[in-house]
Image (spheres, rainbow, N blue to C red):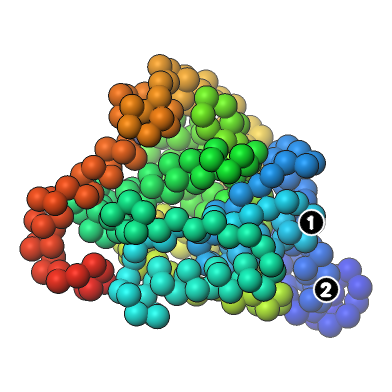
Amino acid sequence: MKCKRCQDPAVIELRRHNTAFCTDCFLHHVREQVRRAIDEFDMIEPGQRVLVAVSGGKDSLGLWDILLDLGYEVDGLYLGLGIGDDSEQGYSHSSGVYTREFAARRRARLIEIDLPTDFGYDIPTGAAAARRAPCSACGLSKRHLFNQAAVDGGYDVVATGHNLDDEAAVLLGNVLRWNVEYLGRQLPVLPGGNGFVRKVKPLVRLGEREMAAYCVLRGIDYIVEECPMADGNRHLGYKHALDEIETGSPGAKAAFYFEFLSKASSLFRPLAIAEQEDGLQRCESCGAPTTGTVCAFCALVSRATDPERVAAVGVRLGRTRRGRRR
Ligand code: Q46
Ligand code: ZN
Protein backbone atom coordinates (compact mmCIF):
# COMPACT_ATOMS: atom_id res chain seq x y z
CA MET A 1 0.00 0.00 0.00
CA LYS A 2 1.38 3.39 -1.01
CA CYS A 3 0.85 6.86 0.41
CA LYS A 4 -1.79 8.57 -1.76
CA ARG A 5 0.01 11.89 -1.36
CA CYS A 6 3.69 11.09 -2.06
CA GLN A 7 3.76 7.39 -3.13
CA ASP A 8 6.12 6.33 -0.31
CA PRO A 9 5.15 3.17 1.59
CA ALA A 10 2.00 3.90 3.65
CA VAL A 11 1.84 3.34 7.42
CA ILE A 12 -1.89 3.91 7.88
CA GLU A 13 -5.03 3.42 5.82
CA LEU A 14 -8.01 5.73 6.41
CA ARG A 15 -11.07 4.03 4.93
CA ARG A 16 -13.32 6.97 5.74
CA HIS A 17 -11.23 9.17 3.45
CA ASN A 18 -10.52 6.30 1.04
CA THR A 19 -6.82 7.04 1.39
CA ALA A 20 -3.52 5.92 2.94
CA PHE A 21 -0.54 7.92 4.18
CA CYS A 22 3.14 7.59 5.04
CA THR A 23 4.23 9.01 8.41
CA ASP A 24 5.00 12.56 7.25
CA CYS A 25 1.87 12.87 5.13
CA PHE A 26 -0.28 11.44 7.93
CA LEU A 27 1.06 14.02 10.41
CA HIS A 28 0.36 16.70 7.80
CA HIS A 29 -3.19 15.32 7.36
CA VAL A 30 -3.87 15.45 11.12
CA ARG A 31 -2.64 19.03 11.50
CA GLU A 32 -4.61 19.98 8.42
CA GLN A 33 -7.82 18.52 9.88
CA VAL A 34 -7.32 20.59 13.03
CA ARG A 35 -6.50 23.71 11.05
CA ARG A 36 -9.64 23.21 8.93
CA ALA A 37 -11.85 22.66 12.00
CA ILE A 38 -10.50 25.85 13.60
CA ASP A 39 -11.11 27.83 10.39
CA GLU A 40 -14.48 26.32 9.52
CA PHE A 41 -16.01 26.93 12.95
CA ASP A 42 -14.09 30.15 13.79
CA MET A 43 -12.68 28.54 16.90
CA ILE A 44 -9.60 30.64 17.65
CA GLU A 45 -8.69 34.13 16.45
CA PRO A 46 -5.05 34.97 15.77
CA GLY A 47 -3.31 36.17 18.94
CA GLN A 48 -5.84 34.64 21.34
CA ARG A 49 -4.57 32.75 24.39
CA VAL A 50 -5.72 29.16 24.58
CA LEU A 51 -5.96 26.87 27.61
CA VAL A 52 -6.12 23.20 26.66
CA ALA A 53 -7.67 20.78 29.16
CA VAL A 54 -5.29 17.83 29.38
CA SER A 55 -5.95 14.42 30.94
CA GLY A 56 -2.77 12.54 29.96
CA GLY A 57 -4.69 10.67 27.23
CA LYS A 58 -3.98 10.57 23.50
CA ASP A 59 -6.59 13.15 22.50
CA SER A 60 -5.70 15.98 24.85
CA LEU A 61 -1.91 15.51 24.62
CA GLY A 62 -2.16 15.15 20.84
CA LEU A 63 -4.28 18.30 20.65
CA TRP A 64 -1.81 20.27 22.77
CA ASP A 65 1.03 19.10 20.52
CA ILE A 66 -0.83 20.04 17.33
CA LEU A 67 -1.87 23.49 18.60
CA LEU A 68 1.73 24.22 19.63
CA ASP A 69 2.92 23.15 16.17
CA LEU A 70 0.28 25.31 14.50
CA GLY A 71 1.81 28.27 16.36
CA TYR A 72 -0.89 28.99 18.96
CA GLU A 73 -0.09 30.39 22.38
CA VAL A 74 -1.42 27.44 24.35
CA ASP A 75 -0.94 26.37 27.97
CA GLY A 76 -2.21 23.14 29.55
CA LEU A 77 -4.53 22.62 32.48
CA TYR A 78 -4.45 19.30 34.31
CA LEU A 79 -7.12 18.40 36.86
CA GLY A 80 -6.19 15.65 39.35
CA LEU A 81 -9.39 13.68 39.98
CA GLY A 82 -8.13 11.36 42.72
CA ILE A 83 -9.22 8.26 40.79
CA GLY A 84 -7.42 4.97 41.48
CA ASP A 85 -5.01 4.21 44.31
CA ASP A 86 -1.98 6.29 45.24
CA SER A 87 0.53 3.89 43.65
CA GLU A 88 2.40 4.82 40.50
CA GLN A 89 -0.08 2.71 38.53
CA GLY A 90 -3.11 4.49 39.99
CA TYR A 91 -5.17 6.12 37.21
CA SER A 92 -4.93 9.75 38.27
CA HIS A 93 -1.36 9.41 39.47
CA SER A 94 -0.10 8.02 36.17
CA SER A 95 -2.19 10.37 33.99
CA GLY A 96 -0.54 13.25 35.85
CA VAL A 97 2.91 11.78 35.19
CA TYR A 98 2.27 11.50 31.41
CA THR A 99 0.96 15.06 31.33
CA ARG A 100 3.95 16.52 33.20
CA GLU A 101 6.40 14.58 31.03
CA PHE A 102 4.78 15.96 27.88
CA ALA A 103 4.78 19.53 29.19
CA ALA A 104 8.46 19.26 30.18
CA ARG A 105 9.41 17.79 26.80
CA ARG A 106 7.61 20.52 24.86
CA ARG A 107 8.66 23.21 27.39
CA ALA A 108 5.02 24.16 27.64
CA ARG A 109 3.35 25.75 30.64
CA LEU A 110 1.15 23.42 32.69
CA ILE A 111 -1.34 24.60 35.31
CA GLU A 112 -2.39 21.96 37.83
CA ILE A 113 -5.43 21.70 40.08
CA ASP A 114 -5.81 18.71 42.38
CA LEU A 115 -9.34 17.97 43.63
CA PRO A 116 -8.30 16.12 46.83
CA THR A 117 -5.64 18.70 47.78
CA ASP A 118 -7.36 21.87 46.62
CA PHE A 119 -11.03 21.04 47.26
CA GLY A 120 -10.95 18.15 49.76
CA TYR A 121 -12.66 15.42 47.72
CA ASP A 122 -11.85 12.80 45.11
CA ILE A 123 -14.30 11.73 42.42
CA PRO A 124 -15.16 8.22 43.71
CA THR A 125 -15.83 9.27 47.32
CA GLY A 126 -17.15 12.76 46.58
CA ALA A 127 -19.62 11.52 43.96
CA ALA A 128 -20.95 8.83 46.31
CA ALA A 129 -21.23 11.33 49.19
CA ALA A 130 -23.11 13.75 46.94
CA ARG A 131 -25.23 10.88 45.56
CA ARG A 132 -24.23 11.55 41.98
CA ALA A 133 -22.88 9.19 39.33
CA PRO A 134 -19.05 9.51 39.23
CA CYS A 135 -19.03 10.81 35.63
CA SER A 136 -21.68 13.39 36.48
CA ALA A 137 -19.69 14.74 39.46
CA CYS A 138 -16.52 14.58 37.37
CA GLY A 139 -18.04 16.40 34.39
CA LEU A 140 -19.47 19.11 36.61
CA SER A 141 -16.12 19.59 38.39
CA LYS A 142 -14.25 19.77 35.08
CA ARG A 143 -16.65 22.25 33.46
CA HIS A 144 -16.54 24.57 36.44
CA LEU A 145 -12.80 24.41 37.12
CA PHE A 146 -11.71 24.67 33.47
CA ASN A 147 -13.86 27.75 33.08
CA GLN A 148 -12.70 29.27 36.36
CA ALA A 149 -9.03 28.65 35.58
CA ALA A 150 -9.47 30.25 32.15
CA VAL A 151 -11.19 33.31 33.65
CA ASP A 152 -8.52 33.63 36.37
CA GLY A 153 -5.66 33.21 33.90
CA GLY A 154 -7.09 35.64 31.32
CA TYR A 155 -7.42 33.01 28.58
CA ASP A 156 -9.69 33.68 25.60
CA VAL A 157 -10.50 30.07 24.75
CA VAL A 158 -10.66 26.66 26.46
CA ALA A 159 -9.89 23.78 24.07
CA THR A 160 -10.82 20.18 24.84
CA GLY A 161 -9.76 16.94 23.16
CA HIS A 162 -13.22 15.66 22.20
CA ASN A 163 -12.82 13.82 18.91
CA LEU A 164 -15.28 12.73 16.22
CA ASP A 165 -15.96 9.40 17.97
CA ASP A 166 -16.80 11.21 21.23
CA GLU A 167 -19.07 13.74 19.56
CA ALA A 168 -20.89 11.15 17.45
CA ALA A 169 -21.46 8.98 20.56
CA VAL A 170 -22.82 11.93 22.56
CA LEU A 171 -25.05 12.86 19.62
CA LEU A 172 -26.40 9.31 19.41
CA GLY A 173 -27.16 9.35 23.15
CA ASN A 174 -28.93 12.70 22.88
CA VAL A 175 -30.94 11.60 19.84
CA LEU A 176 -31.99 8.32 21.47
CA ARG A 177 -33.55 10.33 24.31
CA TRP A 178 -34.38 13.45 22.29
CA ASN A 179 -32.57 15.62 24.82
CA VAL A 180 -33.42 18.80 22.94
CA GLU A 181 -31.52 21.22 25.24
CA TYR A 182 -28.37 19.14 24.94
CA LEU A 183 -28.83 18.83 21.17
CA GLY A 184 -29.03 22.60 20.98
CA ARG A 185 -25.73 22.93 22.80
CA GLN A 186 -23.86 20.14 21.03
CA LEU A 187 -21.60 22.32 18.93
CA PRO A 188 -17.87 22.33 18.21
CA VAL A 189 -17.79 25.90 19.60
CA LEU A 190 -19.68 27.26 22.58
CA PRO A 191 -19.49 31.04 22.60
CA GLY A 192 -18.24 32.89 25.67
CA GLY A 193 -19.94 35.65 27.64
CA ASN A 194 -21.85 35.99 30.93
CA GLY A 195 -18.82 34.70 32.85
CA PHE A 196 -18.25 31.75 30.49
CA VAL A 197 -15.06 31.46 28.45
CA ARG A 198 -15.42 30.28 24.84
CA LYS A 199 -15.10 26.45 24.51
CA VAL A 200 -13.81 24.76 21.38
CA LYS A 201 -13.27 21.19 20.18
CA PRO A 202 -10.60 21.31 17.46
CA LEU A 203 -10.43 17.48 17.06
CA VAL A 204 -13.97 17.03 15.71
CA ARG A 205 -12.63 16.11 12.28
CA LEU A 206 -10.41 13.32 13.68
CA GLY A 207 -11.29 9.87 15.02
CA GLU A 208 -9.80 7.96 17.98
CA ARG A 209 -7.70 5.76 15.76
CA GLU A 210 -6.19 8.77 14.03
CA MET A 211 -5.32 10.38 17.37
CA ALA A 212 -3.75 7.19 18.71
CA ALA A 213 -1.69 6.84 15.51
CA TYR A 214 -0.71 10.52 15.70
CA CYS A 215 0.65 10.11 19.24
CA VAL A 216 2.52 6.91 18.39
CA LEU A 217 4.11 8.45 15.28
CA ARG A 218 5.00 11.63 17.19
CA GLY A 219 6.51 9.61 20.08
CA ILE A 220 4.02 11.03 22.60
CA ASP A 221 3.57 8.71 25.61
CA TYR A 222 0.02 8.75 26.91
CA ILE A 223 -2.11 6.84 29.37
CA VAL A 224 -3.67 3.94 27.47
CA GLU A 225 -5.76 2.64 30.37
CA GLU A 226 -9.38 3.83 30.35
CA CYS A 227 -10.63 5.63 33.42
CA PRO A 228 -11.81 2.82 35.76
CA MET A 229 -15.02 4.75 36.47
CA ALA A 230 -16.00 4.51 32.78
CA ASP A 231 -17.06 0.85 33.21
CA GLY A 232 -20.67 0.43 32.20
CA ASN A 233 -20.78 4.05 30.98
CA ARG A 234 -23.53 4.36 28.32
CA HIS A 235 -21.25 6.54 26.23
CA LEU A 236 -18.89 3.57 25.64
CA GLY A 237 -21.80 1.44 24.47
CA TYR A 238 -22.78 4.11 21.92
CA LYS A 239 -19.19 4.25 20.70
CA HIS A 240 -19.13 0.49 20.13
CA ALA A 241 -22.47 0.63 18.31
CA LEU A 242 -21.18 3.38 16.02
CA ASP A 243 -17.92 1.46 15.43
CA GLU A 244 -20.00 -1.48 14.17
CA ILE A 245 -21.88 0.77 11.77
CA GLU A 246 -18.66 2.46 10.63
CA THR A 247 -17.05 -0.92 9.83
CA GLY A 248 -19.79 -1.74 7.34
CA SER A 249 -20.19 1.81 6.13
CA PRO A 250 -16.99 3.90 6.34
CA GLY A 251 -17.78 7.59 6.79
CA ALA A 252 -21.12 6.97 8.54
CA LYS A 253 -19.93 8.51 11.82
CA ALA A 254 -18.68 11.70 10.18
CA ALA A 255 -21.88 11.99 8.12
CA PHE A 256 -24.04 11.49 11.22
CA TYR A 257 -22.24 14.26 13.15
CA PHE A 258 -21.52 16.82 10.40
CA GLU A 259 -24.93 16.48 8.76
CA PHE A 260 -26.47 17.06 12.16
CA LEU A 261 -24.43 20.27 12.49
CA SER A 262 -25.33 21.54 9.03
CA LYS A 263 -28.97 20.41 8.80
CA ALA A 264 -30.48 19.95 12.27
CA SER A 265 -28.47 21.67 14.98
CA SER A 266 -29.92 25.14 14.37
CA LEU A 267 -33.45 23.79 14.96
CA PHE A 268 -32.54 22.98 18.57
CA ARG A 269 -30.45 26.11 19.19
CA PRO A 270 -33.23 28.39 20.55
CA LEU A 271 -34.05 25.88 23.31
CA ALA A 272 -30.43 25.79 24.50
CA ILE A 273 -29.96 29.55 24.38
CA ALA A 274 -33.14 30.11 26.37
CA GLU A 275 -31.81 27.78 29.03
CA GLN A 276 -28.39 29.42 29.28
CA GLU A 277 -29.54 33.02 29.36
CA ASP A 278 -32.52 32.64 31.67
CA GLY A 279 -31.84 34.40 34.98
CA LEU A 280 -28.08 34.05 35.32
CA GLN A 281 -26.59 35.53 38.47
CA ARG A 282 -23.37 35.15 40.49
CA CYS A 283 -22.89 32.22 42.86
CA GLU A 284 -22.83 33.73 46.34
CA SER A 285 -20.03 31.41 47.35
CA CYS A 286 -17.57 31.50 44.39
CA GLY A 287 -18.92 34.19 42.02
CA ALA A 288 -19.39 31.82 39.06
CA PRO A 289 -22.45 32.32 36.80
CA THR A 290 -25.42 30.28 37.99
CA THR A 291 -29.20 30.17 37.87
CA GLY A 292 -29.51 29.56 41.63
CA THR A 293 -28.01 31.33 44.63
CA VAL A 294 -25.18 28.78 44.90
CA CYS A 295 -23.68 27.17 41.78
CA ALA A 296 -23.87 23.42 41.16
CA PHE A 297 -20.12 23.07 41.77
CA CYS A 298 -20.20 24.72 45.20
CA ALA A 299 -23.21 22.57 46.11
CA LEU A 300 -21.26 19.48 45.01
CA VAL A 301 -18.19 20.46 47.05
CA SER A 302 -20.24 21.03 50.15
CA ARG A 303 -21.90 17.59 49.89
CA ALA A 304 -18.74 15.80 48.75
CA THR A 305 -16.79 17.09 51.76
CA ASP A 306 -19.56 16.78 54.36
CA PRO A 307 -17.91 14.63 57.09
CA GLU A 308 -21.07 12.67 57.87
CA ARG A 309 -21.79 11.86 54.24
CA VAL A 310 -18.15 10.92 53.59
CA ALA A 311 -18.05 8.68 56.67
CA ALA A 312 -21.26 6.94 55.53
CA VAL A 313 -19.74 6.32 52.10
CA GLY A 314 -16.54 4.96 53.69
CA VAL A 315 -18.53 2.47 55.77
CA ARG A 316 -20.69 1.46 52.80
CA LEU A 317 -17.69 0.88 50.54
CA GLY A 318 -15.52 -0.63 53.28
CA ARG A 319 -12.83 1.91 52.52
CA THR A 320 -9.93 2.59 54.83
CA ARG A 321 -8.41 5.30 52.75
CA ARG A 322 -9.02 7.22 49.54
CA GLY A 323 -9.52 5.15 46.43
CA ARG A 324 -8.23 1.96 48.06
CA ARG A 325 -10.72 -0.38 46.46
CA ARG A 326 -10.68 0.98 42.97
S1 Q46 B 1 -12.62 10.80 33.76
FE1 Q46 B 1 -14.41 11.49 34.81
FE2 Q46 B 1 -14.32 10.43 32.39
FE3 Q46 B 1 -13.56 8.96 34.48
S2 Q46 B 1 -15.03 9.72 36.00
FE4 Q46 B 1 -16.17 9.54 34.10
S3 Q46 B 1 -16.01 11.57 33.27
S4 Q46 B 1 -14.89 8.27 32.80
S5 Q46 B 1 -13.91 11.45 30.49
ZN1 ZN C 1 -20.02 28.54 43.22
Q: Confirm whether residue 83 shows in the render.
A: yes
Say which residue label 2 marks: 24
Measuring from the top left, give residue 229's x and y in whole percent: 33, 63
For the residue pair 138 and 214, the one nearer the viewer reads as: 138
Residue 283 sits in which quadrant?
top left
In the picture, the quarter occupied by the N terminus is bottom right
**Does residue 144 appear left or right of residue 204 in this picture?**
left
What kind of residue is marked 1? Leu
Residue shown at 38%/44% (left/top)?
140
What kind of residue is marked 2? Asp
Kindly state the secondary structure of the residue where label 2 is placed.
Answer: helix
Residue shown at 62%/67% (left/top)?
103
For the residue pair 38 and 115, the one nearer the viewer reads as: 115
Q: Residues within 10 Å of mark 2 (few under 14, many from 20)?
A: some
Q: Is mark 2 within 8 Å of ligand 1?
A: no
Residue 191 sits in which quadrant?
top right
